[in-house]
Image: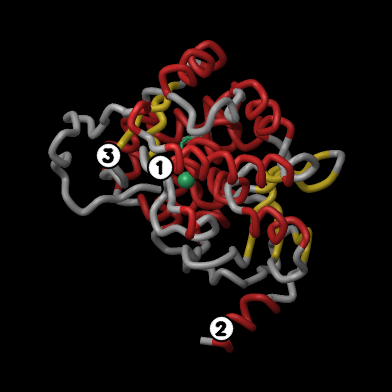
Amino acid sequence: MSAAASKAPPPGARPDWTIDQGWDNYAEAEHQVWVTLYQRQSQLLPHRACDAYLKGLDALDLHRGGIPDFRRLNLELTRLTGWQVVAVPGLVPDEVFFDHLANRRFPAGQFIRKPDELDYLEEPDIFHDVFGHVPMLTDPTFADYMQAYGAGGLRALKLRHLHHLARLYWYTVEFGLMQTPQGLRIYGAGIVSSRAESVFALDDPSPNRLGFDLERVMRTLYRIDDFQQVYFVIPSLAELLRVTLQDFGPLYDRLEHAADVAIDAILPSDRVITRGTQAYANARAAAQ
Ligand code: PHE
Ligand code: FE
């Protein structure tokens, strides 16, 4: 999710905050960071990421010669689902971000992380944004979901319920898991772009894994500084789209009076897939 304090685009950016990717200006060392990250993750993700993601990754050929050139990437992406990737200088204001999504444009950071921070970054870079998010945008159902989310974001801003809608983004687009006949699979961009969390999210006994419930997700706090303590599991992308196409107005009204839910809570109404030990989170907290 993207928030920037200032509402005016930085110098050099267009009014909609987009910039040229400037693909010709990447240094060889920057392409090399992409290649390293790409190789690591693409080896890890078969049998971990969902089929839609793996199919998209394959279709987009994201490994050709380092950092993808958006001009070439967009030819394929537009052909598949009508989506485009646009370069932005960094985080953009919420309404700018949602307006892009509502028009099937995904704003992606233009810069790439440094070789000494392969596993940790504070702001989403082009690897997270493109490797993490764009393969899912080749799936027609997910493509519709992201567009609807953008429109819903503009609406949530007006209704002053963005904090609720943002949790939906977090627990689906960024950290979502899916139940499949072959077992749990990842579709969240924050997981597939992280080597450690790609393993942790599926295999570690620490986090809770709970059946997805829209209202429950919107009530649940989240952490941005470490692995998640809870993941929500959808039955399918079609089901995610189906439940989110309802009018959120009445739901927002109900949420006015509903208490937030702690990140490690399990409620009697939850469908528990894994009851986590929270051992990882507890050990990290004790070490502080
Ligand atoms: N249905 C939501 C609303 O009424 C919009 C939305 C769709 C939000 C899909 C997120 C995902 O606001
Ligand atoms: Fe992201």
Across and down, in percent, residue 101 comes to: 39, 31
Q: Residues within 10 Å of mark 3 (few under 14, many from 20)?
A: some
Q: Classify mark 1 as within 8 Å of ligand 1 or not, answering yes or no.
A: yes
In this view, the mark in front (2 or 3): 2
Q: Nearer the viewer, mark 2 or mark 1?
A: 2
Amino acid of disc 3: Glu
Dot 2 or dot 1: first in sequence order is 1
Give amino acid for label 2: Ala
- The reply to whether the C-beta atoms of the residues labelled 2 and 3 are less than 8 Å apart is no
| Label 2 element class | helix
Which residue matches tag 1?
249
Of residue 157 and residue 254, the one placed in the foreground of this image is: 157
On the image, numbered disc 3 is attached to which residue?
Answer: 95
Sequence-wise, which precedes: disc 1 or disc 3?
3
Give the residue drawn at x 74%, y 56%: 202
Q: CA distance from mark 1 to mark 3?
A: 19 Å
